């Protein structure tokens, strides 16, 4: 297929955006937020085989940057995380339109998998649900954004 640098950047950025968007809806404490960031790191490494594998693998490499530390997320400003996350997810939509339908679906599922794993990583303060209603809603919003 031949993945471009711009496509790779946009898919990697969308992975960060999914993470930020879900974390912005989380009421987890500091330890919970650390768990969510680690969950993102783990989920990014779940590179599937198939039509979207090449671009997902390239995005994974971009995010890992050859180090074990992974990307940084500033979780101190929830409004900024929400806006930045949304922008990053919206920016990948034109890239998805350039891919085959099968590859685009696989990239969408990979991104949604990241969002799910981040949401499942930590319970909200005082909550008992693995994924809060707000986080579940955020995942559905991401699903809608990814479909343009």
Image (cartoon, rainbow, N blue to C red):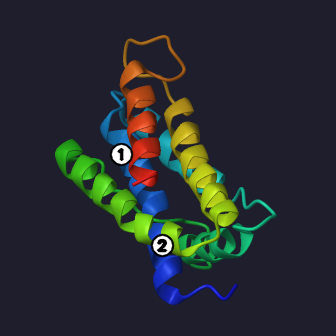
Looking at the rendered structure, the number of numbered marks drawn on it comes to: 2
SS category of the residue bearing label 1? helix
Quarter of the image with the N terminus in it: bottom right
Which mark is drawn over residue 95? 2
Element on which disc 2 rests: helix
Residue 13 sits above or below residue 3 on the image: above
Asked whether 128 or 142 is in front, the reply is 142
Residue 84 visible in this rendered orientation of the protein: yes
Q: Is residue 111 left or right of residue 43?
A: left
Question: Relative to 123, does residue 113 appear above or below in the rendering?
Answer: below
Q: Residue at x 37, y 41 (%)?
A: 23
Provide residue 140's location: percent of width, then percent of height.
Answer: 44, 35
**Residue 53, x across and y down, in percent:** 73, 68
Residue 2 shown left or right of residue 41 in the figure: right
Q: Residue at x 60, y 62 (%)?
A: 104
Residue nearer the viewer, 143 or 81: 143
Q: Which residue is mark 1?
A: 21
Residue 17 position within the rendered picture, expressed as x and y whole percent measured from the top left = 39, 56
Mark 1 is surrounded, within 10 Å at the Cα level, by few (under 14), some (14 to 19) or many (20 or more) other residues, namely many
Q: Quadrant of residue 51?
A: bottom right
Position of the C terminus, as image quadrant, is bottom left
Looking at the image, the residue that sits furthest to the right is: 49
Could you tell me how far apart the alpha carbons at marks 2 and 1 are, in whole angstroms? 19 Å
Q: Say which label, 2 or 1, has the lower sequence index.
A: 1
Q: Are marks 2 and 1 in contact (CB under 8 Å)?
A: no
Q: Is residue 120 above or below residue 38?
A: above
User: Is 112 situated left or right of 24 in this image?
Assistant: right
Residue visible at 48% across and 72% down in the picture: 95
């Amino acid at each position: 297929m031949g993945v471009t640098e711009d496509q790779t950047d946009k898919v990697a950025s969308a992975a960060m955006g999914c993470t930020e968007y879900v974390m912005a809806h989380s009421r987890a404490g500091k330890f919970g937020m650390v768990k969510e960031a680690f969950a993102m790191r783990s989920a990014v490494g779940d590179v599937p085989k198939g039509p979207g594998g090449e671009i997902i693998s390239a995005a994974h490499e971009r995010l890992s940057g050859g180090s074990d530390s992974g990307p940084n997320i500033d979780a101190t400003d929830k409004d900024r995380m929400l806006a930045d996350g949304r922008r990053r997810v919206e920016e990948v939509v034109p890239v998805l339109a350039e891919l085959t339908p099968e590859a685009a679906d696989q990239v969408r599922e990979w991104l949604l998998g990241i969002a799910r794993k981040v949401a499942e990583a930590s319970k909200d303060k005082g909550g008992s649900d693995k994924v809060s209603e707000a986080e579940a809603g955020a995942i559905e919003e991401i699903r809608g954004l990814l479909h343009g």
